[in-house]
Amino acid sequence: MSDAYEYTTAAMGTVVSVRVAGGAPAERPQRVQRALAWFAQVESVCSRFDANSEVRRLCAHVGTPVPVSALLFEVLQFALAVAAASDGAFDPTLGALGEARGFDRHWRSGLPTNAPRETRATGEGRRSLGWHTVVLDARQQTVMLRTPLLLDLGAVAKGLAIDLAARELADCGDFAIDAGGDLYLGGSNSAGEPWSVGLRNPSSPDTVFARLRVRNQSVCTSGDYARASSDGVSTHLIDPTSGDAATGDAATRAISATVVAPHAMVADALATAAYIMGPTRGIALLEQQGVHGLIVSANSTHVMTRGMSAWLDHPATHAA
């Protein structure tokens, strides 16, 4: 893809890169800018770090149905569906716990989020939180929060932005979107072959332990090496059961989960859920949802879904 148009920018707290080879060369810059505009649009709706975002405005109202945009309603509807499918391992209502762990500053300004005090549930207050306290009305397109809480849509919003950007670029043929390691890969690479995706070794993030070959798919990974605090513990992947980082012995605790799916919002959310659930339950969830995935446990054992080996260059893992 040596003649491709490439553009890189900062968005949603990460670096977003787009490469486009198809379509009319003169139109590529404009198409890429339209695609990237979706990241700003989704962030303005879904960011818990921005006091002016739609989701933060929603969190200011408790006990009353609030009309919301179609985009926010779609994100919340999907997030709650994943919460239900994962038996609450994925929970979009834990923003206050993320703040308590130090994940509390806007990526661009560095300023604290200053979420309303009443949303900062701790201790016994955690018991009143949970995805079941968010009530959606599809007919009225409203959302009601039964209790004060801070919604965190990070595990779905970036995936949605990638999907919307990919839809903008679909007519271009071969293209790649990389948002902080979460990918959508359309068409083929410069050699006319499926795209090659390296999976980082969670124990040594500068090395690759496996490679995937994909086209027209998203690949997203959740791992405990990303956004770690000073003591090396993940600050943003919270187990709703404990309100803390996921724990367990070396065989039952995941250190990374990678999902391959046709849509980035699906891959992103299910990778997060599978990471929290651990290798055995996480793989079962991915199988149930009909996507492919690979989970690395803390003892460096690799387990994967049936059929995942078809995506690997050199299958080196075993099916769960």
Image (cartoon, rainbow, N blue to C red):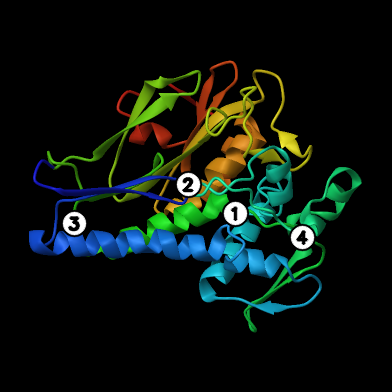
Q: Position of residue 26 (x, y in %)?
A: 9, 62
- N-term-proximal mark, 3 vs 1: 1
- Number of labelled discs? 4
Mark 1 surroundings: few (<14), some (14-19) or many (≥20) residues within 10 A = many
Q: Which mark is residue 248?
A: none
Q: Which mark is residue 49?
A: 1
Residue at 59 percent of width and 39 percent of height: 274
Q: Tell which tag, 4 or 2, sits nearer the viewer.
A: 2
Q: Position of residue 197 (x, y in %)?
A: 32, 34
Residue at 30 percent of width and 27 percent of height: 313
Q: Are marks 1 and 2 in contact (CB under 8 Å)?
A: yes
Q: Which mark is residue 13?
A: 2
- N-term-proximal mark, 2 vs 3: 2
Mark 3 surroundings: few (<14), some (14-19) or many (≥20) residues within 10 A = some
Question: Element at badge 1?
Answer: loop
Residue type at mark 2 is Gly
- Residue position marked by numbered label 3 in the rendering: 173
Q: Is residue 260 above or below residue 234?
A: below
Residue at 63 percent of width and 53 percent of height: 152
